[in-house]
Amino acid sequence: MSYQIMQLPIFQPLREKYQTHFSSWFWDKVFPLAGDVSLKNFGIGDARLAEDIRKETNIIVHMAATVNFAER
């Protein structure tokens, strides 16, 4: 899944800019995090970790989805 994120068209200009170094640049900036967007702090139970993430994060790209086919 994480590798697929790197392949998204939105990152094409950065792939061109960093070329062979794109992967290391990307993983220095991006941290995939599994969570639940319906819960406070994405369901991260460790308050200190949640606060650190909040302080260090500039952009959130979510790929939230549901597998409940009976959603409203």
Image: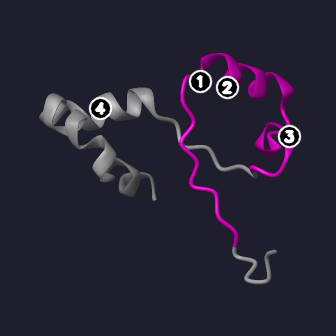
Give the distance between the C-alpha atoms of the residues marked 3 and 2, in whole angstroms: 13 Å
- Element assignment for label 1: loop
**Secondary structure beneath label 2:** helix
Q: Residue at x 76, y 52 (%)?
A: 36
List the residue tagged with mark 4: 24
Q: Earlier in the sequence, mark 3 or mark 4?
A: 4
Q: Indicate which disc residue 53 carries.
A: 2
Q: Quadrant of residue 43?
A: top right
Q: Nearer the viewer, mark 3 or mark 2?
A: 3
What mark, if any, has residue 35 been given in the picture? Answer: none
For the residue labelled by badge 4, is the local secondary structure a helix, a strand or a loop? Answer: helix
Q: Secondary structure at mark 3?
A: helix
Q: Name the residue carrying label 3.
A: 40
Q: Amino acid at mark 4?
A: Ser
Residue 40 lies in quadrant: top right
In the rendered structure, which disc, 3 or 1, sits on the residue that comes first in sequence?
Answer: 3
Mark 3–mark 4 distance (CA, rounded to whole Å): 31 Å
Q: Residue furthest top?
A: 55
Q: Which amino acid type is shown beneath numbered disc 1?
A: Thr
Q: Nearer the viewer, mark 3 or mark 4?
A: 3
Task: Give whichever of discs 4 and 1 has the lower sequence position.
Answer: 4
Residue identified by numbered label 1: 57
Q: Residues within 10 Å of mark 2 (few under 14, many from 20)?
A: few
Q: Residues within 10 Å of mark 4 (few under 14, many from 20)?
A: few
| CA–CA distance in space, label 4 to label 2 | 20 Å
User: x, y (%) of residue 46?
Assistant: 84, 32
Q: Is residue 21 left or right of residue 50?
A: left
The magenta-colored residue range is 37-66
Q: Is residue 71 above or below residue 10?
A: below
Picture residue at 81% right of the left edge, 22% below the top: 48
